[in-house]
Image (cartoon, rainbow, N blue to C red):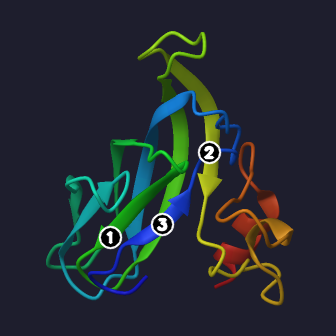
Amino acid sequence: MPADTYRTVKVAGVADIPNDGSAGAVSVVATVADISSQGILFGRPDADTSQTLMGIYGGDDKQTTSFSAVLAVGSDGTIQVKANTTARLILDVQGYYTSNDDGTAPGGFVAMNGKRIRSRQERDPLHPDRREGGRSGDGVRHHRRGPDPDLARHERGR
């Protein structure tokens, strides 16, 4: 992703996060890789809300860095993320916090079995001719339960 540019990521309706407005925040593990230098990852629900620091990544060796963060979900079902350097960002949803007056308990946490969401601009490493998730459409998504042996073999062969 380009430096200092917010990327909007659709989370509602993706990776088992409800699309009915009942998800008020998402818990994610953010992994920042292929960085150009040390930097900071920011997040926010929308352009009208102040950014929050999600984590500091990199270091002298420009290593891949992962950290957990909780981000409020915007009224349109998205979050926005920005790295202040060029980087590859991977977001794995760990769960979501409920919110709203639709009968769900406000602030309740719904744990999930680690689902990955990615930008639809990112290519599938096993099938470079198609987008992640195998379909275009509703924003970012990549559903995977547990380890993917084909991906592990592909990455070992790099």
Question: What secondary structure is found at the residue carrying circle 3?
Answer: strand
17 is higher (above) or lower (below) than 52:
above
CA–CA distance in space, label 2 to label 3: 12 Å
Q: Assess whether mark 3 and mark 2 are in contact (beta carbons under 8 angstroms).
A: no
Question: What secondary structure is found at the residue carrying circle 2?
Answer: loop
- Towards the viewer: 91 or 154: 91
Q: Which amino acid does label 3 sit on?
A: Thr
CA–CA distance in space, label 1 to label 2: 19 Å
Q: Residue at the spot x=64%, y=37% of the render? A: 17
Mark identifier at residue 8: 3
Q: Which amino acid does label 1 sit on?
A: Lys
84 is higher (above) or lower (below) than 145:
below
CA–CA distance in space, label 1 to label 3: 9 Å
Closer mark to the observer between disc 1 and disc 3: 3
Q: Earlier in the sequence, mark 1 or mark 2?
A: 2
Where residue 136 sits, quadrant-wise, is bottom right
Which residue matches tag 1? 82
Which residue matches tag 2? 12
